[in-house]
Amino acid sequence: MNHKMKKLASYYKPYLGLFVADLFFAILGAAITLAIPLIVRYITGNVITLEPSQAMEKILRLGILMVVLVLVECFCNYFITNYGHMMGAKIEYDMRAEIFGHYQKLSFSFFDNQKVGQLMSRITSDLFDISELLHHGPEDLVISIIKIIGSFVILLCIDVKLTLIAFVFIPMMLVYAAYFNKKMKRAFKRNRARIADINSQIEDNLSGIRVVKSFANEGEEMDKFQEGNLGFLSAKKSSYAYMAGYHSGLGALTTMITIAVLVFGAMLITKGQVNVTDLITFLLYINTFTDPVKKLITLTEQFQNGYTGYERFLEMMAIRPDIVDEPDAAELKDVKGDITFEDVSFHYEDNDQQVLSHINLKVEAGSYMALVGSSGAGKSTLCSLIPRFYEVSGGSVKVDGVDIRRVKLKSLRDHIGIVQQDVYLFVGTIADNIRYGKPDATMEEIVEAAKNANAHEFIMSFPDGYDTDIGQRGVKLSGGQKQRLSIARVFLKNPPILIFDEATSALDNESEKVVQESLEVLARNRTTFVIAHRLSTIKNAQKILVLTEKGIEEAGSHRELLAQGGVYAHLYQMQFAD
């Protein structure tokens, strides 16, 4: 707990000035609240007994003083609400930047097991609760303690019996509130989990809306959503029931204090033990000490809310990226592009089944290597090990004779270009998406890359050319167009090592020809790995590897493998039998 709280407190550091000012005005405001009933008591007890002219003058003076105090209190409350919240928002901003930066560092294996909606809620609603706690927590605590102790001391000085009658209700209020609070905390935690579920469901539905509509399954989706939404509603229902019990009960107890003080005070007045002035003062103070009690209780609720959010934040920050630079990692420079796999084995984290076992492979710089084989034989996995998207379970992958674990991740990936089957395009224009390959590229370079990728013509056919907005994930473009944009990205990046992961398998024949041409241009003088479904696309590869469950089963050129009459020949005949 201690370490966590220390870390939490460290977020105040950049805003220390603001934090101190916030507390100062909180204390000042609380002091004024305590002072005003004392002035009222002085007027009703002393001033009205003076002769009229003197009394009028004093009353006016004290009236003006009270108005000034109220204006000062008004400013204090304005400052606390405005700048205090701003401080909370700035801390929230810092934490959000921290967690987003952390997401960027985590590796593929983390995202393989996570829902985007859940990750989103950690970055939005959780952090909001934390910032509310960091702003309200300290200031509410200070105000409450000052008001409760202050009013208790002042009232004791006025009349001990009445004070004890008033304060006898406080422990009852605390016990009552604590009971309901515990219930509310549990309910709020459930709400949290439910809203994260709903978020991930919405994200899932909207990302796949085209599939939903193509199956006309809007009804099914509504039913699925209905279930999650109802779960949220029932979680809310119980939390509101507890909330209602909490507020109504505390309201009743506050009124009971007023009644008790009034009844006992009136009795004591008739006996001449208390005067009317003191009774009025007591009634004025009742809110001053019951409000902070409510505030303290709200604070525990806020603390629980914010703290569970904070624990979820820490949980996420504690996940170590499993692929990081070693302390003495070097920059990868002047890459030729020799790649060797030495006795490489791999299995996914949560699965002991080997995807690759004891693979040995040497690829000369500038050569064109194709991988074929049934799906599930580990072709994509093999290629994912080169940029270290996943870490090898055994053996090592080397670039130019250097183990890739000894080089900086960024410099390794800067030298590798990947064209995948599933092209991801970002929201923005065509130029923005090509520029992703080299963020500081000039427009000339972008156009050059597009020409090399056979994309310039279709881009210029749009009215806005390179400034065409492509819609979310590029829905306005055809498969072949998207693919050519992703190739243009890689042309712009200009890396010595290339990986084509079934880059043309989703395209029609005509698009495939165009894309294939641009891929061939791109592959010149670079070390190239091609994962292919269609064997027609790899006839010119210098070397073809046939991967099966047993590892690399065959290797050779197209001609040699056909002559062998093994797995490759069988695959080839199946594809071209018609």
Image: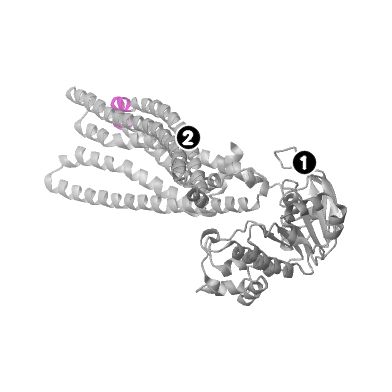
Rendered view: 107 above or below 296: below
Please tell me the numbered disc located at residue 190.
Answer: 2
Image coordinates for residue 137, horizontal then vertical, percent: 46, 42
Question: Of circles 2 and 1, which is in front?
Answer: 1
Please tell me which residue is depicted at 36% across the width and 33% down the height of the picture. 153
Q: Are marks 2 and 1 in contact (CB under 8 Å)?
A: no
Frontmost residue, 146 versus 437: 437
At mark 1, the secondary structure is loop
Picture disc at residue 126: none
Image: 74 above or below 514: above
Magenta part, dominant SS: helix
Q: Position of residue 308 (x, y in %)?
A: 52, 38
Q: Which quadrant of the rendered structure holds the C terminus? A: bottom right
| Residue closest to the far bottom | 444
Instruction: Classify residue 357 as left or right of residue 156.
Output: right
Q: Is residue 159 magenta?
A: yes
Does residue 137 lie above or below 541 as drawn? above
Q: From this viewpoint, is residue 462 visible? A: yes
Earlier in the chain: of badge 2 and badge 1, it is 2
Tell whether 37 sits left or right of 386.
Answer: left
Query: Mark 1: few, some, or many residues within 10 Å (few <14, many ≥20)?
Result: some
Q: Amino acid at mark 2?
A: Arg
Q: Image quadrant of residue 235?
A: top left
Reply yes or no: does residue 545 show up in magenta.
no
Observer-nearest residue: 81 or 112? 112
Relative vertical location of residue 112 with respect to residue 525 in this rendering, above or below = above
- Image check: 117 left or right of 269? right
Q: CA distance from mark 2 to mark 1?
A: 39 Å
Point out the stretch of residues depicted in magenta: 156-166
User: What kind of element bears circle 2?
Assistant: helix
In the rendering, which numbered label is found on residue 354?
A: 1
Q: Please state which amino acid type lies under the numbered disc 1.
A: Gln
